[in-house]
């Protein structure tokens, strides 16, 4: 199995955690998003990932794009340990939490969007950083409130074992810290982040531990 | 079953199609995103949907948020007719196509993002519309290329029956048309859109057919 990844990409980070939790060996293929005009934009890489995004997972058959689709694939083909609860309603709640990060926070702060802000709209560095923080803060406030009142909040976002929700939350917290979001304002997110990072599967998936880390 | 929906919301539109395809009756509860300062932002609605987004589906238990999580829930609880193929690799490809729309196009053009562009970054109406069209055009070009070379492209995005991919594509094409995207530049997207709209399940889910249509 090959994972095309960039150490700082939070979508790649999600998949690295899943692979580690499920005990799956993989070859790490670094795709540098900033070097050489963006290695994700080369024709060769776009054969694997037409949108020019990381990650891509290749396991025998066709290349797989989109981190949440890859997580579902891994869950279906390597079901142990499960990263979704068993009941449909619970699964929907975990998926909705993950999608709140994967749809409502992360894409708005993606590299190509930030570039458009500065190059096309003339946003200053300060305005760009304020944009970045705005969407994380709005999202984190909502996620924190949901976890505080959630009846299933445990050691992790849903219960006492990691789910897709935690696989999306941890990389997003890492991103927030890079942009000086004070995670202490979100005590439940911080508690869950800390619990996750005590597990080897999460700690070994962190950007600093990747072969392409700088 | 109750669906909190706004007629023009493409995330709501996806769920309406799924409910129709699966033959499920539901009560339509309109949430007007522009009236009364935004009905999605009231404390009462935020009890159901903390992010203040549509749609929300309520079926007995806890309210369900995030359209793709709702689609997965409906697929698990009402499996006929299936809206995902059977094999894990095929399911991943369909989900990835859906996520390319749901993550990489739609959220960047969401109402609250457009409002930030104009209110915080001072973008003109023209710049805002150019932004909107940019993300659709980039996404549609990629989706069109994928369908052209896809080995499983049929009457619909994957095979000859509708899947999650079509449920995301059709509302996004509708959005594009509102912002004067010429769908003729993407002949495969147009062909699939036209095929879908010949089915009652899609036609009856269209914005103009909803009780809150204007």
Image: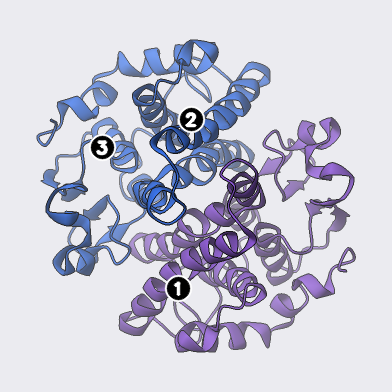
Chain colours: A purple, B blue
Give the residue drawn at x 58%, y 82%.
A193
Q: Label 1, label 2: how many angstroms apart (C-alpha)?
A: 29 Å
Per the image, label 2 sits on a secondary structure element best described as helix
Q: In front: mark 3 or mark 2?
A: 2
Give the residue drawn at x 37%, y 66%.
A90
Cβ–Cβ under 8 Å for marks 1 and 2:
no
Same subunit under labels 1 and 2? no
Residue with the mark numbered 1? A140
Residue B145 percent location from the top left of the image: 65, 21
Q: Would residue B85 be visible to someone looking at this image?
A: no
Residue B96 percent location from the top left of the image: 58, 41
Same subunit under labels 1 and 3? no
Q: Is residue A73 left or right of residue B183?
A: right
Residue with the mark numbered 2? B133
* Chain under callout 3: B
Q: Would residue A138 be visible to someone looking at this image?
A: yes
Mark 1 nearby-residue class (10 Å; few <14, some 14–19, many ≥20): many
Per the image, label 3 sits on a secondary structure element best described as helix
Earlier-in-chain disc, 3 versus 2: 3
| Number of numbered tags placed on the structure image | 3
Specify the label residue B202 is tagged with: none
Give the residue drawn at x 52%, y 21%.
B159
Give the residue drawn at x 32%, y 50%.
B77
Q: Is B175 drawn above or below residue B109 in the view shown?
A: above
Residue B58 percent location from the top left of the image: 20, 57
Per the image, label 1 sits on a secondary structure element best described as helix
Q: Tell me where residue A20 sits by quadrant.
A: bottom right
Residue with the mark numbered 3? B16
Q: In front: mark 1 or mark 2?
A: 2
């Amino acid at each position: 199995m090959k994972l095309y990844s960039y150490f700082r990409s939070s979508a790649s980070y999600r998949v690295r955690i899943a692979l580690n939790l499920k005990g799956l060996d993989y070859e790490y293929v670094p795709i540098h998003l900033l070097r050489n005009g963006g290695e994700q934009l080369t024709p060769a890489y776009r054969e694997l990932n037409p949108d020019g995004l990381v990650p891509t997972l290749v396991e025998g058959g066709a290349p797989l794009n989109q981190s949440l689709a890859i997580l579902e694939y891994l869950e279906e083909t390597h079901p142990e340990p499960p990263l979704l609860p068993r009941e449909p309603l619970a699964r929907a709640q975990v998926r909705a939490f993950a999608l709140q990060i994967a749809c409502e926070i992360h894409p708005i702060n993606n590299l190509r969007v930030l570039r458009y802000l500065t190059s096309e709209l003339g946003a200053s560095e300060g305005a760009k950083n304020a944009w970045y923080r705005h969407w994380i803060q709005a999202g984190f406030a909502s996620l924190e409130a949901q976890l505080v009142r959630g009846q299933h909040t445990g050691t992790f976002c849903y219960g006492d074992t990691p789910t897709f929700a935690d696989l999306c939350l941890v990389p997003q917290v890492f991103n927030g810290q890079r942009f000086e979001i004070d995670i202490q304002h979100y005590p439940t997110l911080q508690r869950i982040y800390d619990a996750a990072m005590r597990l080897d599967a999460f700690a070994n998936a962190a950007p600093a531990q990747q072969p392409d880390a700088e």
